[in-house]
Image (cartoon, rainbow, N blue to C red):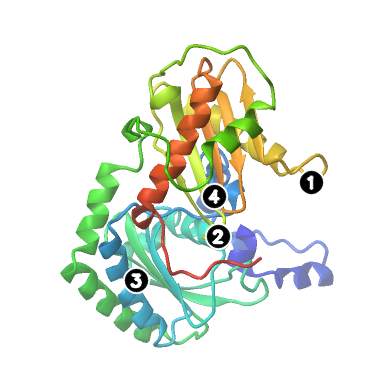
Amino acid sequence: MQMILILTKSINRSFEKNPKFDMTLLLGGTDDVFSSLSHSFSWNPATFLHAYTCLPLAYATRQAAGAILQDVADSGVLFAILMCKHKVISLVGAQKASVHPDDILLLSNFVMSSESFRTSESFSPICLPRYNPLAFLHAYVHFFDVDTYLMLLTTSSDAFYHLKDCRIRIETVLLKSNVLSEVQRSLLDGGIRVEDLHVAPLPRSGPSPHQVQQIVQTDSPERPREPFVGIGGPAGLWHFIYRSIYLDQYVSSEFSPPLTNHRQQKRLYRAYLRLYASMHDKGIGPYKTQFKRDENYVLLCWVTQDFELYAAFDPLADKAEAIKTCNRVCQWLKDVENEIFLHGASPFSW
């Protein structure tokens, strides 16, 4: 799909005419793009969740960014996407057009790993494989700072100056409303941390925690243990990933001790991959819940019609306490959803 983004699927015709066709020249200078993509398979949950993540921001700040992007979309821009590194700040599509999370992943990888985009404003043909794999769109890309950039996509090949004017309008509003400074502040503050999960009563609304406990504990009954509090959050919670099914967005906690080095983080990522695959295996599943304990972690997964939750605990974590903590995580995210999710973007049907 990354190749299609650069060349479109029409490259197939070249191979049909000549099976010995060499596409090396067409992919010249893209080594870093593919190297970056392959690296993301060991750290970016978007590669298997098929969802994107947002930079945490105050609701009013994200709304201010979305309002000016919507004005631009109404003036002939197909997609307007404001991003910080690989995280979405805001995005809008013209009329009923929607951009698939996989395309956001491929676009951000392409832009972030191509030095040419950083040095000057760019206007480049690109193809969105999930939108239309056979046709080029044209992307105007501009970095406001080292991390924050704007992508304006259009079907017109001669829209550079119009998009440049749109970018100037957007930049003026973003500066006046302090969006760019808030983006930098959020980047410095980091994302959600499990240590910030308060030990509070179980949620008064939402899915019943007792029902979840009953479903999960039938998986593998064990002798009761004394509650064990690990290094990270309550009940030894080390990390979690939460995916909103309706929004096609996810939020992932920051890595907490003892997941302090890249090797440990990569091992957890691969454990999540295996857990996701087993949860969605159509041959033997799909499952609604899963609880696994090994020498490295306690892994708990909960899939409903609204969300998926993947959580990693200390390997000595108590099962009942882990379940209660997962319920508190869901309630916590519900309380702060306006800051961590982008509302108003079209849900994706695919």
Relative to 77, is 173 on the left or the right? left
User: Where residue 37 sits: x, y (%)?
Assistant: 55, 48
Q: Write the residue at 42% across / 43% down.
A: 204
User: Where residue 293 sits: x, y (%)?
Assistant: 61, 20
Q: Amino acid at mark 1?
A: Lys
How far separated are the C-alphas under marks 4 and 3? 22 Å
Q: Amino acid at mark 4?
A: Ala
- Front residue of 178/159: it is 178
Q: Are marks 2 and 3 in contact (CB under 8 Å)?
A: no
Which of discs 4 and 3 lies nearer the camera? The answer is 3
Which of discs 2 and 4 lies nearer the camera? The answer is 2
**Which disc, if any, is residue 66?**
3
How far separated are the C-alphas under marks 2 and 3? 19 Å
Q: Write the residue at 65% across / 70% down.
A: 8
Label 4 belongs to which residue? Answer: 46
Q: Secondary structure at mark 1?
A: loop
Which of discs 1 and 2 lies nearer the camera? The answer is 2
Res. 114 visible in picture: yes
How far separated are the C-alphas under marks 1 and 2? 21 Å
Q: Residues within 10 Å of mark 4 (few under 14, many from 20)?
A: many
Q: Secondary structure at mark 3?
A: helix
User: Where residue 275 sits: x, y (%)?
Assistant: 65, 35
Q: Are marks 3 and 1 in contact (CB under 8 Å)?
A: no
Which of discs 3 and 1 lies nearer the camera? The answer is 1
Q: Amino acid at mark 2?
A: Tyr
* Above-or-below relation of 93 to 197: below
